[in-house]
Structure formats: C-alpha cells, structure tokens
Image (tube, rainbow, N blue to C red):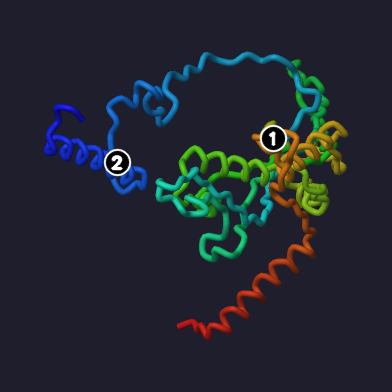
Amino acid sequence: MVGWGTDKVKTVLLIVAAVVAVAVIAGTGLIKVNNPLADLFDGGKSDPSAKGEVIYEGQTAKSASERFMIEVGRGEAIVSVKAKQNWDTPGGPLSGDVQSTNGTSSVRDPENPDTPAKLALDVRYCSTGFVEVETEKNAAGESKPTKVTVNVDELVVCDVVLPMNERNAGAFHQDDTPDQFNRQFVGFVAGAVETAGKAAPCPTDQLAEFQTDKFDAHLRKAMAKSMGVPESIIEVKRGRIGQSPPDVKEKLRSDLDSYANKVDPDDPSKTFQGLDMTYLNSRDATAFWNKEIDKWVRVIKAADVKAE
C-alpha cells in the first residue's frame, strides 16, 4: 500500500476483523443488529393482523328450502382426538437453530398429555314435519280449531357443531407456534371433528327417542301452549328415521378423505397422511374407554400413587 503507514494498515485490518466478528455473532442469534437499509429491500415488516373495515349491509332472502326443518331436540357426541403439528423455521450454519422443531400445536387431554382429548359436539335433531289444522266457524262467524295434526315425518340429524367452550378449547395447546399457524391447526382439527360427527352412522337409538309416548305427550303439550288450544284436539303422527340424500353422502365422503389425505402444497401430485378417522359403536366405545382406564390404573399402581 503505497503511501500508507504501518499504523494505518493495522487500523484497517482491525476494523475488518471487527465487522466479520459482529456478522458471525449476529448470525448465531446471540445479538440483534438492526439494519437501517433493510426496509429498502424486503418491504418492511408484516402487519400483525388484517386492517380495514367490516360493514354489515343487510340481508336478502334468495330462495325457499326444499325441506323444512323443525328442531325437535339436541344431543351430544364425543369425539376422541389426539393430534399435533410441528412448526419449524429454516436454520443455517450461523443461525444457532439446531432444533428439529421450533414449536408444536396440539390437541390432547388437558390433564394427561398422552391421552386423547374428549371433544364434545353439539348435535341437533330435526323433523321435516308439518302441521294440519281443521277449523269450524262458531256462532259469531269466527274460525275455531277443532283438530290439530302434527306430522313428524322424517327424523334426521340436521346440524353438528364443535363449540369452542372452555371444555373444548382447553384441549388445544399452543407451544411456541405463531398465532396464524396455530389458528390454521385449530381450524383444521375442528373441521375434521365436525365432519366426523356429520358423517357418522345414523344414530337410530337417539332418533328413536322421538318416537315414544313420552315425546308425543311433550309435543302435544308444547303445541297446545303455542296455539292456545286444548291438548285433547292434538294428534301426533310419529315420524320415521330419515336418510341423507346421495349427494350429501358423497360430499361427506369427500370431506372425510380431504382430512385423511392431505395434498403437499409444494407438490400437488403428492399426498401425505392427515388424520385417521375411526368410528366406534356404543359397545366398542365403552370397550375403548375401559381399556384406557385400565391402562392408567396399571400406571398408577406401578408408580405406587395413592390418594390421600
């Protein structure tokens, strides 16, 4: 270096060495170096959430239903779920990230991590029924009901919903995963659980509860109160257990398959295993949970845990 003294050369070399050292340490994540030019190249930071307006502008009736549904009762279905999804960020030789995963979203029993969670679905039972009213005019010329016939018609499951109440929400766990990632996981699992409930075999035993003398009496009393007529003029014609139309069955099969076999977003020609779907009848379900209980009884005995 012509015209440079030894001291100047040493100073330049020290500055270069310091810059390299800072770059290496920053790459390991031990310190954070703010780059004042970063926003000029990567567009700045992402918004933490959507921004804008939501304006309800009203609603318009578009069409009439082909089947009219009357809710006749509600029930609960239990779905056993144990699933997880790992989240990871790409590391590098200087990133300091040597973990196989950076976080996990999961659903499991809140008290026993190795046990499936028992999520409770709200089930609505409906009838495609209709009411016939016979009247006659009294001396004043006013129409008065003389007979009311309640045709229950078909009994079906009309809706299945997974409510995110304290019980169900407590089964979902977010461990060091981004909020958006966790929301997608919860939405995927909740959708799978609801679809499993909708696609379950027809609950004939439960629907049969609405084909009893007790239900007929309940319906007569409710209709008499609603219409302001005596129960004695109300006749109930019991319904029959209905079936889902072929197109609905095919849609449910397709939905179940979409949760069991996921398409690789990086290669649409490839699929990977999603969630296994298994249906237990009441006898098998009892056997399943008895087996789970027996397993934990053995674990407790082996650990010599005693209640006090």
88 vs 19, nearest the viewer: 19
Return the mark for residue 267. 1
Residue at 62 percent across and 41 percent down: it is: 188
Q: Is residue 121 above or below residue 45?
A: below
Amino acid on which disc 2 is placed: Val
Residue at 69 percent across and 35 percent down: it is: 267
Residue 197 can be seen in this image: no
Return the mark for residue 225. none
Can you say which quadrant of the picture contains the C terminus?
bottom left
Residue 291 in the figure: left or right of residue 118: right
**Residue position for label 2:** 20
79 vs 227, nearest the viewer: 79
Q: Is residue 218 above or below residue 290?
A: above
Q: Is residue 220 above or below residue 296?
A: above
Instruction: Point out the tag, 2 or 1, that comes first from the N-terminus.
Output: 2
Can you say which quadrant of the picture contains the N terminus?
top left
Residue 13 in the figure: left or right of residue 92: left
Amino acid on which disc 1 is placed: Asp
Residue at 69 percent across and 52 percent down: it is: 77
**In which quadrant of the rendered view does residue 43 lie?**
top left
Give the x, y percent position of residue 48. 40, 31
Residue 169 can be seen in this image: yes
Determine whether the residue tagged by mark 2 lies in a helix, strand or loop: helix
54 vs 124, nearest the viewer: 54
**In which quadrant of the rendered view does residue 61 lie?**
top right
Give the x, y percent position of residue 91. 47, 45
Q: Is residue 120 above or below residue 180?
A: below
Crowding near pointer 1: few (<14 within 10 Å), some, many (20+)? few
**In which quadrant of the rendered view does residue 263 lie?**
top right
Residue 148 in the figure: left or right of residue 229: right
Determine whether the residue tagged by mark 1 lies in a helix, strand or loop: strand
Give the x, y percent position of residue 262. 70, 41
